[in-house]
Image (cartoon, coloured by chain):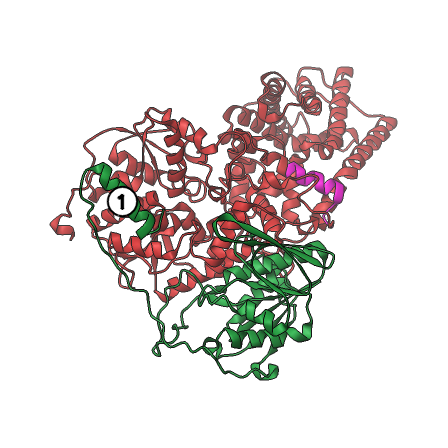
Amino acid sequence: MILLPATLAEPQSFSLWEKLLLAGLVIASVALFWRRFGVVLDVILRSKKDADFRLFPIGKRVRDFLWEVMLQAKVIRQRPLPGLAHALVFWGFCAFALVTLNHVAVGLGIGFLDPLGLMGRFYFDLAALFALGCAVGILGLFVRRFFVRPRWLGEKISYESGFIALLIFLLMVTYLAAFFVADASPTASFLWWAHTLALLVFLPIIPYTKHLHLVLSPATVFLSRGGFSHIPPLSGDEDFGLVTGKDLTRLVSLQAYSCVECGRCTEHCPAANTGKLLNPKEIILGLRRYLNEFGPASDEPLLGKHLAQEAVFECTSCGACEFQCPVGIEHLPILIGLRRGAVNTGTWEDDHGGKLFLALERGSNALGMSAIERDKFIQKQELPIFDGTQEYCLWLGCMGGYDPKGREIIADFARVMDYLGASYGVLRKEKCTGDPVRRLGNDLVFQQLAEANLEALAQNKVKKIVSICPHCVRTIQEDWKEYGTPPEIEHHSEFLARHLSQLPTAIDQEKIAYHDPCYLGRYRDIYDQPREVADHAGELVEAPHARERSLCCGAGGGLAFLGEEQGQRVSHVRARELAGTGATTVSTACPFCNSMFRDAFASDGAGAPQLLDIAQLTARSLPESKPESAV
Amino acid sequence: MKIIVAIKQVPERDTPVRIDSGGKWIEETDLQWTMNESDAYALEEALQLKEKDGGEVVVVSAGPERVGSTIREALAKGADRAIHIECNDFAQRDALSVARLLAEAIKPESPDLVLTGLQSDDLGYGQTGVILAELLELPHVSLILHVEKTGTLLHVKRELEEGWFQNIELPLPAVLTIQSGGNKLRYATLMGIKRAKTKEVRRVTPADLGVPASAVAILEHIAQPQKQKSTQILPGPAKDAAAALVEKLKFEVRVL
């Protein structure tokens, strides 16, 4: 055990009036704290109960808590330097909890840690190390906020943050300085009182500012719905999503008050970065302002004074916000919940959206084409029909069945499956999985599509599906669960990566930039398999935004079917980034990304890289005719 | 204003139809059904009139049990109540017989306005609405794109050939047949569907209405369209061949 040469100095004794003063100050500080915190707690508890909330299995909650809160892994991982500075402050606070208790106890004459005893000496020395880290951390954060000033923190200078930083610095300095003064000296007394005052001023500031996250966010992380973009089922006949304050659940309210305003969500939001109204941080803060003004039992519509409908419908559901959030806020259930509220009650009016809903109410696909076009494609391509004997049901999806480029991907993937001798078939009839209507909040049409498809799959005795579309994969596997048990499903990148050893390698080693589709990466945690496939076909290069931090193509959340965007097009920004890698080919693993980049590259004219799905990358190195063995 | 909308349920466009063993009608099992398109526009027009001036929208539909889903859709989109004329011999009835059923169901309601689609997507007679007006002894105008009401008068806009329109003024009560495309259709909502559950659907039978199953026009047989494929090669230099192609596309195939 390493002990510091000095020990912590404490005042010798406290007079009665000092003790009374201290007790009075502590009571005032706690009362001021509770005056606001009690209100917040009341708002959260008066919110509607989360009908689908289950505490168990608790293991994952504990793991997430340890990883995200105690180890600060998410904070550090997503912003390494400021993250580490924050972690030092956080760990300092944790170590300080016992020191602070003892500090106040000393003032009341009931101190329990003796600075000269072995236990006390060890603990105070340990806390001194943490205090040193904490002081350095808070200094770093102060410099960042007031001198570096990243734009995610907002235009306005937050003086309260500066004051809080000063208080924390003061707390640490007054603690550390006590190691260098004589025990029971007047300086020791002065340091003790300075430390106490800093502490008692700090406490009531917490609930009035974003520092409320100190108290709430550990609970928010622990109690989160879990999973990514988990859209809760509607409960009962009067639940249409988030319409008024009455629809805000406890988890939503807790999350609204937990926001620490760090702006990570906005920093990574494709909409916010291309000049749109949507700013995910302002969505959460808008909810908080709503709760502060109207409360959780209000009939006031949520979309109005504090939240804009236009912003809510600009979300591509890419999930970069939710993925990054260090305090456990789940943006997607909120954004999609607000859309559900607007669509399920008919208050959202949009020409393109209305057309999409009608196309899926009356027809079979999101492209609004006749189902006969799909039959024609199947005949022309001579795709085998699924009859229950084959291993895989090859799901075409709207893009694979109707979109010209999507059809090329299906054709090439079918060639690869043929080459591998895999047995597969396509369904005679297929409806849209409901992904765009699910993300746009149309529960009625989504339910109709999910139920019709589940029935068709059960009738055809489908056991395993493979699909070229990450949106279909996600919707079938996760979102359909509300209405039945979907068959096992995988994305074609998983299938291809598994069979890579049986496929010929490319002779040409061109540079290939791979774009991570949001619904494959963040939604399904598949990053390596498509890279293996791309690397097999050439030399893989990475885009500046890659893997978990991939930038959306702009198509998700049903936006592929809506009208012109405000500001820059998300697809063009991402396409330029991909082209900027110097790769001769850009590869995707999603027909929607493909379609967005196709248009973006076409408008850039000559010199744009070639655009291929990973299935097409694989298919181009296949021999023209099938080898004998694989027939 | 009380508005009645007569709605027909027809097979969904994408469903491949098969002719039944009798050769007089299509095989109804396995078919997907939907609201006739121009009737959907008639309903939309009625709902917009109601939203402007208040009143009530009542939908009437004739047909077997399955018609219930289309009635529910109309209620979900905002109709106030419905009358379902339950008849299983719907396919055997001609336009006159169907119009009689509708007229008898509508008469006791004494509506201010009756709307229906211009024609059905399946049989396409285009007569039911017009005959209905005769049976109700009301004035009627067909092919309507837009309706406006001022006082006791209606101003309607008809679509004629080649981009011409005709504006007509007529008194209420009246019968109008509505053309597709005049408005934007609203989408069905979850709230609408749930509210629809509590709305009244009155069931009546042809016997209740005193309309026998007799048909004047008898459907003899129906057939699938014959597929034809023929190839013509236009000889000569490219310029002449292109000119000949344009002629053919314009006057023979009529796609230009």
Between A203 and A179, which is closer to the camera in this rendering? Answer: A203
Q: Residue B219: x percent and y percent?
A: 41, 76
Q: Quadrant of residue A551?
A: top left
Q: Residue A402: x percent and y percent?
A: 36, 49
**Which residue of the protein is positioned furthest toward the right in this rendering?**
A17
Whether residue A320 is visible, yes or no, is yes
Residue shown at the point (49%, 79%) measured from the top left: B88
In this rendering, the answer to whether B9 lies above or below A69 is below
Q: Residue A104: x percent and y percent?
A: 75, 31
Residues rendered magenta in the picture: A284-297
Between A18 and A210, which is closer to the camera in this rendering? Answer: A210
Q: Residue B176: x percent and y percent?
A: 60, 62
* Chain ID at mark 1: B
Q: What is the display colour for chain B?
A: green
Colour red maps to chain: A
Residue shown at the point (32%, 65%) measured from the top left: B225
Magenta span: chief secondary structure: helix
Q: Quadrant of residue B221?
A: bottom left
Between B177 and A401, which is closer to the camera in this rendering? Answer: B177
Q: Quadrant of residue B100?
A: bottom right
The residue pinned by badge 1 equals: B245
Residue shown at the point (68%, 72%) measured from the top left: B109
Q: Secondary structure at mark 1?
A: helix
Please check the rendered image and state whether residue A291 is part of the magenta-colored stretch, yes or no. Answer: yes
As drawn, is A314 to the left or to the right of A591?
right
Between A126 and A570, which is closer to the camera in this rendering? Answer: A570
Q: In the image, what residue type sits under mark 1?
A: Leu
